[in-house]
Image (cartoon, rainbow, N blue to C red):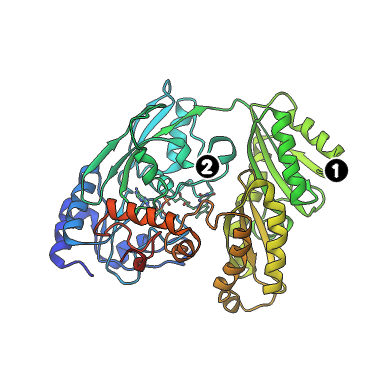
């Protein structure tokens, strides 16, 4: 139901007209996300500057049954942060709540408002000689409230865990406007249920995160980064074990890249091929604070075993950056190759090779000529299983196969006891997929949580749990 003009005026009054956007041109950037897949409409975008304002907004929204869509950096890939096309939902942007509240190097914590950009958090940690290890290609735009709400993963999960593992405390505004101040800086606190974890990964459906206490780590004093050619995904898995063992578990990144993915980066993003000759697969691996020449030792042992055919170890920060750009520009480089159907899946690390073989066979049977642009965080068993259209196929005809392709891939994922959304979340994109897959008892617990925390279903309705599922 569209909020009445009187309700919109009450909501706007909380933040002041200067921060309540009502004209379509002014709200355009809040209505569409970077892939332009989700483009919404809304009568109002609110930009509060404090927890107190968020609290007053939600109290009014709950009373008037106004749907609220929280938005942080607007880089989410599942449509959770954009209003629907119906034009009934009010967007609440956290972009003005961007203050770092305190940094405590001795306690290794940083406390920040939810709208702080991830890169700014990393820089604030760096300024006190500490590391905040969450790192994603979108880090210049995404904001910590969004990272926690999606339980973001990224490049260093293998060493430091995902966003959930990096959070000690939260401040959350509940659906009825009450504020829970759980900004605790404690490493140990077994005083009852862990409420913090309920809001992490909830994609704005249970409460609005307004602040967080995050863990900091010592900054690595040295790093070794290698771009490595391997004959197969199984060789890459074997290399991961070897590298962990031989380095004393110093592996902080371990990315798998299919040759076609690297070819796209070279062809379309101006990336320099890091090695002299092409190979079927590559690994981009990084060690932090390794023993002298640890990477060279691992690679030598791996070559003797036949699981590595060639490798280059970065000799400068520039070369390291160039290796990483080969990995980070893959998504962008797929665009000139036509349509791409994406899957963000996870299986146990040991099962990745069999998963890839079975998924490739199933997809080829479904669509002969489909091109596999698989890459991702092998160290976490998380593969971005992206499929580019066959050469010469009509783009729209290919994209029309999206659901059928998902059916084929997710069936293989399920055979391996995997996840259909390893790090990007559910949002609107996968809500029906999730309810079709999860066991009834798990879904019932989720529904009970939703009705306990948001009985009037005003927080991000339709995201995560489909609307018909709640009625
Ligand atoms: P938004 O997109 O604004 O919101 C995401 C969800 O959280 C929405 O459902 C929204 O309603 C909800 N939300 C936002 N703020 C709050 C809040 N304060 N309280 C409650 N709910 C809230 N993700 C990964 O995990 N790993 C990657 O490696 C990765 N790489 C990416 C690379 C690119 C180029 C892009 C564009 C995206 C990538 N992503 C990745 C996805 C995305 O960046 C992450 O999901 C990120 O955590 C979203 O943060 P955000 O601030 O943009 O949130």
> Which of 18 and 95 lies nearest the eye of the viewer?
95
Q: Residue furthest top?
A: 106
Q: Which residue sits furthest front?
A: 441
Q: Residue at x 47, y 63 (%)?
A: 430
Q: Earlier in the sequence, mark 1 or mark 2?
A: 2
Q: Is 29 above or below relative to 168?
A: below
Question: Can residue 384 be seen from the camera position used here?
Answer: yes
Residue under label 1:
306
Q: Is residue 7 left or right of residue 202?
A: left
Residue 266 seen by the camera: no
User: Helix or strand or loop: what does disc 1 sit on?
Assistant: loop
Question: What percent of the width, then of the height, locates residue 193?
Answer: 35, 37
Q: Secondary structure at mark 2?
A: loop
Counting every numbered tag in the picture gives: 2
**Quarter assignment of residue 155:** top right
The x, y position of residue 83, in whole percent, is 34, 64
28 sits left or right of 252 in the view: left
Contact? badges 1 and 2 (CB < 8 Å)? no
Up/down of 229 relative to 125, above or below: below
Residue 243: image x %, image y %? 72, 35
Say which residue label 2 marks. Answer: 135
- Residue 397 placement: quadrant: bottom right
Mark 2 burial class by Cα count in 10 Å: few <14, some 14-19, many 20+: some
The answer to whether 158 is drawn above or below residue 205 in the figure is above
């Amino acid at each position: 139901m569209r909020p009445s003009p009187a309700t919109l005026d009450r909501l706007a009054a909380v933040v002041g007209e200067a921060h309540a956007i009502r004209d379509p041109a002014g709200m355009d950037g809040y209505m569409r996300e970077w892939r332009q897949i989700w483009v919404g409409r809304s009568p109002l975008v609110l930009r509060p500057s404090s927890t107190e304002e968020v609290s007053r907004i939600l109290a009014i929204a709950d009373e008037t049954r106004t749907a609220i869509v929280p938005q942080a950096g607007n880089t989410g890939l599942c449509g959770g942060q954009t209003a629907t096309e119906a034009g009934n939902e009010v967007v609440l942007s956290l972009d003005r709540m961007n203050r770092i509240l305190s940094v405590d190097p001795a306690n290794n914590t940083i406390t920040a408002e939810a709208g702080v950009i991830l890169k700014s958090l990393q820089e604030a940690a760096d300024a006190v000689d500490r590391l905040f290890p969450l790192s994603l290609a979108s880090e210049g735009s995404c904001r910590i409230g969004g990272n926690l709400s999606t339980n973001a993963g990224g490049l260093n999960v293998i060493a430091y865990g995902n966003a959930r593992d990096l959070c000690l405390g939260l401040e959350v505004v509940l659906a009825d406007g009450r504020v829970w101040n759980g900004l605790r800086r404690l490493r140990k606190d077994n005083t009852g249920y862990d409420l913090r974890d309920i809001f992490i990964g909830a994609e704005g459906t249970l409460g609005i995160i307004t602040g967080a206490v995050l863990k900091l780590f010592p900054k690595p004093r040295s790093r070794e980064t290698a771009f490595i050619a391997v004959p197969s995904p199984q060789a890459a898995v074997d290399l991961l074990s070897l590298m962990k063992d031989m380095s004393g578990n110093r592996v902080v990144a371990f990315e798998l890249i299919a040759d076609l993915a690297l070819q796209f980066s070279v062809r379309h993003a101006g990336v320099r091929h890091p090695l002299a000759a092409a190979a079927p697969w590559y690994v981009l691996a990084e060690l932090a604070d390794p023993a002298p020449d640890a990477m060279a030792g691992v690679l030598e042992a791996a070559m003797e075993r036949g699981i590595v055919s060639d490798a280059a170890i970065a000799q400068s920060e520039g070369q390291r950056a160039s290796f990483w750009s080969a990995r980070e520009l893959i998504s962008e480089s797929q665009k000139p190759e036509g349509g791409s159907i994406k899957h963000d899946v996870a299986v146990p690390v040991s099962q990745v090779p069999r998963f890839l073989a079975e998924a490739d066979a199933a997809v080829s049977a479904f669509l002969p000529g489909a091109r596999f642009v698989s890459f991702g965080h092998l160290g976490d068993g998380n593969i971005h299983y992206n499929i580019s259209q066959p050469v010469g196929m009509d783009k729209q005809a290919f994209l029309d196969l999206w659901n059928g392709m998902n059916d084929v891939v997710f069936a293989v994922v399920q055979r391996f006891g995997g996840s259909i959304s390893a790090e990007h979340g559910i949002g609107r994109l996968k809500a029906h997929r999730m309810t079709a897959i999860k066991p009834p008892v798990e879904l019932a617990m989720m529904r009970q949580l939703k009705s306990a925390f948001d009985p009037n279903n005003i927080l991000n309705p339709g995201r995560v749990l489909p609307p018909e599922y709640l009625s």
